[in-house]
Image (tube, helix red, strand yellow):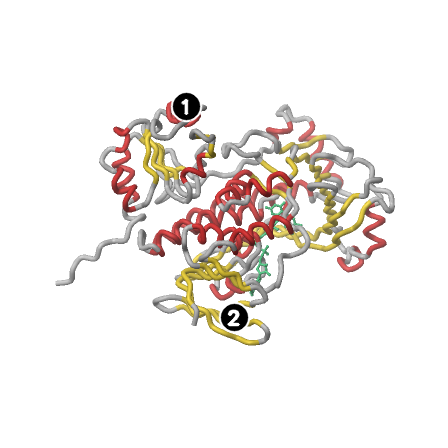
Amino acid sequence: VSSSDVLIVGCGPVGAVLAALLGRRGVTVTVVERELDVFPLPRAAHIDHMGLRALQEIGCLDHLLPDMRPNQGLDFVTAGGDLLVRIPGDQRSISGLPASMYFHQPGFDRAIREAAAALPSVTIQTGTDFCSLTQDADGVAVVVASDGAERTLRASWVVGCDGARSSVRTALGTEMEDLHFSEPWLVLDLVLEPSAPALSEGAIHTCDPSRPVMAIPMPGRRYRFEVMLLPGEDPEIMTDLDVVESILSTWLPPGSAQIERRAVYEFQGLVAAEWRSGRVLIAGDAAHQMPPMLGQGMCSGIRDATNLAWKLDHVIRGRASDSLLDTYTVERRPHVRGIVQAAVDFGRLVCTLDPAEAAARDERMLHATTPPTERWPFRLPLLEPGPLVLEGGGNLFIQPEVGAGQRRLDDIVGGRFLVLAQSARGFGTSAPWWREHVGALVTTIDELPDPSGAVRRWLERKRVACVIVRPDRYLLAATDNLDAVTETVRPVLSVPTRTAQP
Ligand SMILES: Cc1cc2nc3c(=O)[nH]c(=O)nc-3n(C[C@H](O)[C@H](O)[C@H](O)COP(=O)(O)OP(=O)(O)OC[C@H]3O[C@@H](n4cnc5c(N)ncnc54)[C@H](O)[C@@H]3O)c2cc1C
């Protein structure tokens, strides 16, 4: 029976990113994927700077970025086109990367899958269906099927990245918390002909009670319309070509676009109660689903992967006990729940079908004194305080360009912790533990060339001697007392030494 450290079920974007993050750390990974190739049509279209930062870590960013399209901002407008709310998209991001971009998913999925497959410790088995799993004290036996034949694979850990209908989640036996949003939408992916009239360069969600519509510019000549189905409308009839063409005729004359896809999706808000049971975990759509109004479903799944990858690595290397993996649900679940709730709230804003309610909403919002960007701001949540989020922690650390070759900071740090101090005094007596036990990059600002001065200015502004940045780029702490922080996190980041039995 072949065996690996981690078996990932599902090679969608989340499974592929997780495989690449683990593979780069030398963890042996087997990915089983039911389909033979990447899904040929886009679902996700938008990626935020944290997602881009994960692509940077797996070596895909500079290849994928030139084909992406900057997000100029997302407008929520009335039926008459008046601006209710704007979520800016082109602001500077803390990650030193564009805040928000649109991409074409098939090429994106292929690039990350290839990046994972190129790593010597990663094997991707396509055309292979997950059937069942059994846990024992040493690992997990996973039955898979390919070409009609079943076989068993073994792994120390299994991660279900097998999407909304996850069989791994079913095997885990967890409940889904329902945030009570369930609306059917028709998704139309188009390739515009050169003759097509100019459409909006920015995304527009039209909160028209007679038919809510979202218009999303994608890279190149691609464009997406998402159209809400009204009560009683039959998905089968609504995906009929004649019906679709008649809907599209509102914006595009006949013949000015090829329709690549017409499909109805039920937009929902769901979060799994438990993300881990023993040696089995879930990530991505297997753990949460949200309406796509904020373009955060896949982005959240990628954050699951960045959170989980370093923790699995530490446990597998024997640097931490498996209780470290309990912090995965503790950190990720409230974070993603906040985003699902925000997506549901924006979903309700868009999906108001009662004309009187919509008119009252428009009246109220249009007469608000706050500007549209502040009326209903959406910001990514911080990580809540917890075992690995202490004083000054919970936000992302900045990523300036540092070093003689103007490399990005994350590229210098790699997949490690970063312990960075204004001067060696800031380390107290803890530097050896971080360096030798945790495998951190422990450095002072002077040792880390910082030509723009951004890191020094950051530390001075926060008035702290030292920061600890986790491998997922979140701050663990910003502190004047590294020794105290070290004592607090030592039990979580180490394997307890057994006291000898008498
Ligand atoms: C219309 C629409 C628009 C969206 N827009 C955005 C957006 O702009 N930005 C954003 O961030 N998100 C967006 N999303 C959400 C995003 O598409 C999902 O969150 C994302 O695809 C989830 O990735 P995943 O890897 O978790 O799951 P999936 O992409 O569903 O991948 C799961 C994989 O597991 C495989 N699999 C399933 N079962 C098995 C099995 N038993 N054995 C083996 N393999 C299996 C599947 O074949 C698949 O390849 C959108 C979604 C929709 C529907």
Image quarter in which the C terminus is found: bottom left
Image quarter in which the N terminus is found: bottom left
Q: Position of residue 174 (x, y in %)?
A: 48, 61
Regarding residue 220, the answer to whether it shows in the image is yes
Q: Secondary structure at mark 2?
A: strand
Q: Which residue is at the far left? A: 502
Name the residue type under label 1.
Arg
Residue at label 1?
457
Residue at label 2?
144
Say which residue appears at 62% left-offset and 25% top-offset.
370
Q: Which residue is at the far front? A: 405
Say which residue appears at 43% left-offset and 29% top-offset.
404
131 in relation to 440, above or below: below
Q: Position of residue 321 (x, y in %)?
A: 31, 55
Per the model, the C-alpha gap separating discs 1 and 2 is 53 Å
Q: If you read the primary sequence from the N terminus, does the residue marked by circle 1 or circle 2 appear first? A: 2
422 in relation to 353, above or below: above
Q: Is residue 475 left or right of residue 377?
A: left
Name the residue type under label 2.
Val
Q: Position of residue 460 (x, y in %)?
A: 37, 23
Q: Is residue 73 left or right of residue 421?
A: right
Is the CB atom of the residue marked by disc 2 within 8 angstroms of ligand 1's nearest atom? yes
How many marks can you see? Answer: 2
